[in-house]
Amino acid sequence: MWISLSAVRKRAGWYARDDHDKCKSGCWKANATAKMPRFYWDLAKAKASLEKGETPWTPAVSIVYGFAVSLDMILKEGLPNVFARHAP
């Protein structure tokens, strides 16, 4: 079974393309002036890749599959039931 990252996003009801718009201008200024070395949390690389419809790095495929299965389980049970089951 093959599932694309965009299919997982659709199933989850969110789109990463919208997420970079939520980062306020201060976030981008801080990212541009930061001196600390970074790799996975390089927002500029992530934004550039996102504009091409890609991810900057290879995602952990097994986690994407697991996430898809988890979402299917949650949707099958129903969100209110999941919340009720985890309520104190």
Image (spheres, helix red, strand yellow):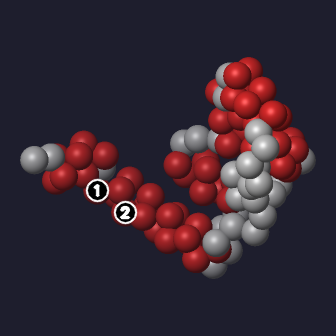
* Residue at (70% x, 22% y) in the render: 26
Q: Nearer the viewer, residue 47 or 66?
A: 47
Q: Amino acid at mark 2?
A: Met
How many numbered circles are shown?
2
Q: Which residue is mark 1?
A: 77
Find residue 14 and report its horizontal and vertical position in percent. Answer: 58, 41
* Residue at (71% x, 58% y) in the render: 40
Find residue 4 and report its horizontal and vertical position in percent. Answer: 70, 63
Q: Give the secondary structure at mark 2.
A: helix
Quarter of the N terminus within the rendering: bottom right
Q: Nearer the viewer, residue 83 or 38?
A: 38
Q: Give the secondary structure at mark 1.
A: helix
Q: Amino acid at mark 1?
A: Glu
The CA span between labels 2 and 1 is 6 Å
Q: Is residue 55 visible?
A: no
Find residue 27 and report its horizontal and vertical position in percent. Answer: 69, 29
**Viewed as shown, does residue 22 lie left or right of 36?**
left
Q: Which residue is mark 2?
A: 73
* Residue at (83% x, 49% y) in the render: 45
Q: Is residue 45 visible?
A: yes
Relative to residue 32, is residue 5 depicted above or below? below
Q: Nearer the viewer, residue 40 or 85?
A: 40
Among all residues in the image, which is located at the extreme top? Answer: 25
Relative to residue 42, is residue 67 depicted above or below? below
**Viewed as shown, does residue 86 lie left or right of 53?**
left
Mark 1 burial class by Cα count in 10 Å: few <14, some 14-19, many 20+? few
Mark 2 burial class by Cα count in 10 Å: few <14, some 14-19, many 20+? few
* Residue at (69% x, 67% y) in the render: 59
